[in-house]
């Protein structure tokens, strides 16, 4: 009969693990070795020897080949008989192992006793020969026995443990009077800003007020001219003609997006908030700060939120699209970090004044546009997201208005069906414009858009799978066991690129990360699995990225099992040719319906 041994761990293929004849598995403590390791070693050695014999037999005569085969069979029959005996004996090995552990423990204890005796002998005969007791502390003993206390304790210990005695009221009055004199001298010797009003000194504390701003109480902790003022209390004041949230600094507060777009806000005297393009120099509107790009269409976008009855702050919307700054810089511009743009009074360089309610509505989160959208985002975030995408897709994407100020994309390209374009628009709205914005996710979307036409169509099929769980192509039945999401940035625990970098790459090969989540519960399957798919455009195959399966982890074993299923799909393609060039979407759909774990 044939002996079958169950082995749950994956066995490395023999061609990937060459056997060294002189190498034996390392034994564990106690003189034992795992049975699984012994079985694995015997199998590898048998496979290695039979491979060597197969290479050598063609060069021998018929008689020599028969002799070699008989010798090999006899040798390894005896080896597997011994292995079979070990397997049968292993069922009763628990008592032997327990006795071996007890014997090892007793040997270890005996060794500790011998080592302790040796250390004691060395200490008594070598280390402690010159050891002497210290002299007795006679003064300490005399103080304790005669006075009942020890008076020689350092005073620093007493000062740290025992709190100081409270000062007398007369001493407190004298100290406050001295502090008040020091405060008055500092106030006389320093220049007081004219904004400070109602300055009074009481009990060593100076109280000052800046009308409409704050009220503060200050004091000094010494008489040195170099000591700073110590703030005791600060109270922010409300104004009667403006809300509480107007009490903000008058200095510009820029909002920088992706280190390129710069938006500046200032408090306007008229009660509004001025919003302008922070890329422009505040002193010369024909120059732009180095590294920044003017925001096209900013004033047209902000005009939707201005009061139509207020004509004081209307901008010239015809000059709302300034050109990009020149790359060449002269010496004077290098000094201040500015770049030239075409001269003109561009609208974005002037502030567009909004009411506080309008600015609040501009920055507030809106309800999701689509049910599949990950999270809410504000209208200003939608504007910046469309702006970043437009910079990358200038040739094939244009912006269109939807509703009251929000924006979306529509692809301008030939030979695409309305369903294809609708898939791109829905995916952009639900996956790209959602908050928080991720620049690298936009870059991955751009990589998909700029892919060749047949690759882009394949990507759109995968998008459709994510949005609805089915492929656009008619006649395909769905029986999905997994839900799928495209990973637009590099996921964790995949040692290929840095975490969060663009994950979709289109070169000679196409790299796509998808995350599968259980739709139908499976006992032995993980809840989620990230699958890095590599599509070879030359061989027209889809496989798991080899670098992702190097580590010996459970996630790697899951990927190896998934790779086996993809290999089966390639075999099916060879047996039954499919007239479908959407290799990635077919592979993803096949995994969603057929991936199971034993």
Image (cartoon, rainbow, N blue to C red):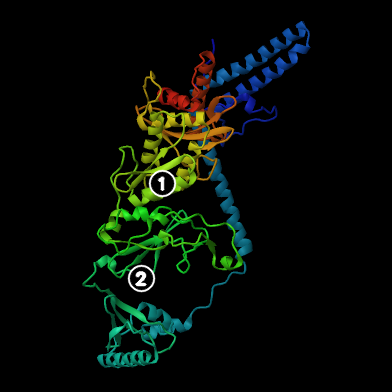
- Quote the CA–CA distance across marks 2 and 1: 30 Å
Q: Quadrant of the N terminus?
A: top right
Q: Position of residue 192 (x, y in %)?
A: 36, 86
Asked if residue 55 shows in the view, the reply is yes
Q: Position of residue 106 (x, y in %)?
A: 53, 41
Label pair 2/1, CB-CB below 8 angstroms: no
Q: Quadrant of residue 266?
A: bottom left
Query: Would you place residue 204 above or below residue 262 in this image?
Result: below
Crowdedness near tag 2: few (<14), some (14–19) or many (≥20) residues, C-alpha within 10 Å: few
Residue located 29% across and 83% down the image: 208
Front-lying residue, 129 or 209: 209
Q: Position of residue 504 (x, y in %)?
A: 50, 38
Q: Which mark is residue 299?
A: none
Horizontal arrangement in the rendering, residue 161 relative to residue 135 (left or right):
left
Which residue is under mark 1? 386
Which residue is under mark 2? 250
Between disc 2 and disc 1, whose residue precedes?
2
**Looking at the image, which residue sits at the far left?**
240
Crowdedness near tag 1: few (<14), some (14–19) or many (≥20) residues, C-alpha within 10 Å: many
Secondary structure beneath dot 2 equals loop
Query: Would you place residue 382 above or below residue 121 in this image?
Result: above
Q: Nearer the viewer, mark 2 or mark 1?
A: 1
Residue located 57% across and 72% down the image: 132
Secondary structure beneath dot 1 equals helix
Front-lying residue, 48 or 319: 319
Residue located 62% across and 31% down the image: 25
Horizontal arrangement in the rendering, residue 240 relative to residue 528 (left or right):
left
């Amino acid at each position: 009969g044939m002996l079958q041994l169950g082995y749950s761990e994956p066995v490395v293929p023999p061609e990937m693990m060459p056997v060294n004849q002189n190498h034996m598995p390392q034994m564990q403590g106690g003189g034992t070795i795992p049975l699984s390791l012994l079985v694995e070693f015997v199998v590898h050695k048998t496979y290695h020897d039979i491979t060597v014999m197969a290479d050598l037999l063609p060069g021998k005569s018929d008689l020599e080949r028969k002799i070699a085969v008989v010798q090999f069979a006899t040798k390894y029959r005896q080896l597997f008989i011994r292995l079979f005996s070990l397997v049968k004996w292993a069922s009763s090995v628990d008592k032997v192992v327990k006795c071996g552990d007890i014997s090892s423990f007793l040997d270890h204890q005996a060794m500790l006793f011998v080592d302790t005796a040796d250390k004691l002998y060395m200490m008594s005969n070598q280390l402690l020969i010159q050891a002497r007791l210290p002299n007795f502390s006679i003064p300490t003993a005399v103080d304790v026995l005669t006075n009942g206390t020890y008076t020689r304790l350092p005073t620093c210990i007493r000062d740290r443990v025992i709190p100081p005695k409270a000062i007398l009221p007369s001493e407190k009055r004298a100290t406050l009077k001295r502090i008040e004199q020091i405060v008055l001298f500092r106030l006389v010797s320093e220049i007081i800003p004219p904004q400070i009003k109602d300055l009074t000194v009481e009990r060593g504390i100076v109280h000052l007020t800046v009308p409409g701003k704050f009220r503060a109480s200050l004091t000094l902790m010494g008489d040195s001219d170099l000591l700073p003022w110590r703030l005791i209390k600060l109270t922010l004041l409300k104004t009667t003609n403006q809300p509480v949230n107007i009490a903000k600094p008058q200095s510009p507060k820029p909002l920088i997006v992706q280190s390129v777009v710069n938006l500046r806000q200032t408090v306007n005297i008229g009660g509004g908030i001025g919003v302008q393009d922070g890329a422009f120099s505040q002193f010369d509107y024909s120059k732009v700060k180095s590294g920044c790009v003017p925001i096209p269409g900013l004033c047209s976008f902000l005009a939707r939120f201005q009061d139509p009855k207020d004509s004081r702050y209307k901008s010239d919307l015809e000059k709302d699209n300034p050109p990009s700054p020149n790359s060449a810089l002269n010496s004077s511009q290098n000094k201040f970090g500015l770049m030239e743009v075409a001269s003109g009074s561009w609208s974005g360089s002037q502030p567009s004044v909004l009411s506080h309610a309008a600015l609040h509505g501009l920055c507030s989160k809106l309800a999701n546009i689509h049910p599949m959208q990950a999270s809410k985002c504000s209208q200003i975030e939608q504007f910046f997201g469309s702006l970043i995408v437009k910079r990358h897709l200038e040739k094939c994407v244009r912006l269109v208005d939807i509703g009251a100020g929000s924006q979306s994309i529509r692809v301008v390209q030939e030979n695409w069906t309305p369903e294809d374009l609708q898939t791109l628009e829905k995916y952009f709205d639900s996956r790209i414009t959602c908050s928080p914005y991720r620049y690298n996710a936009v870059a991955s979307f751009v990589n998909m858009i700029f892919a060749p036409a047949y690759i882009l169509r394949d990507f759109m099929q995968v998008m459709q799978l994510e949005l609805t769980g089915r492929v656009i192509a008619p006649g395909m039945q769905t029986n999905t066991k997994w839900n799928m999401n495209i990973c637009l940035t590099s996921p964790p625990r995949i040692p290929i690129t840095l975490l969060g970098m663009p994950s979709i790459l289109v070169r000679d090969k196409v790299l796509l990360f998808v995350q599968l989540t259980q739709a139908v519960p499976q006992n032995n399957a993980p809840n989620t699995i990230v699958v890095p798919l590599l599509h070879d455009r030359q061989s027209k195959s889809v496989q798991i990225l080899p670098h992702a399966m190097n580590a010996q982890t459970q996630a790697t074993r899951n990927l190896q099992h998934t790779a086996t299923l993809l290999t089966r799909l390639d075999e099916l393609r060879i047996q039954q040719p499919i007239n479908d060039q959407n290799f990635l979407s077919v592979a993803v759909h096949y995994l969603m319906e057929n991936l199971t774990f034993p």
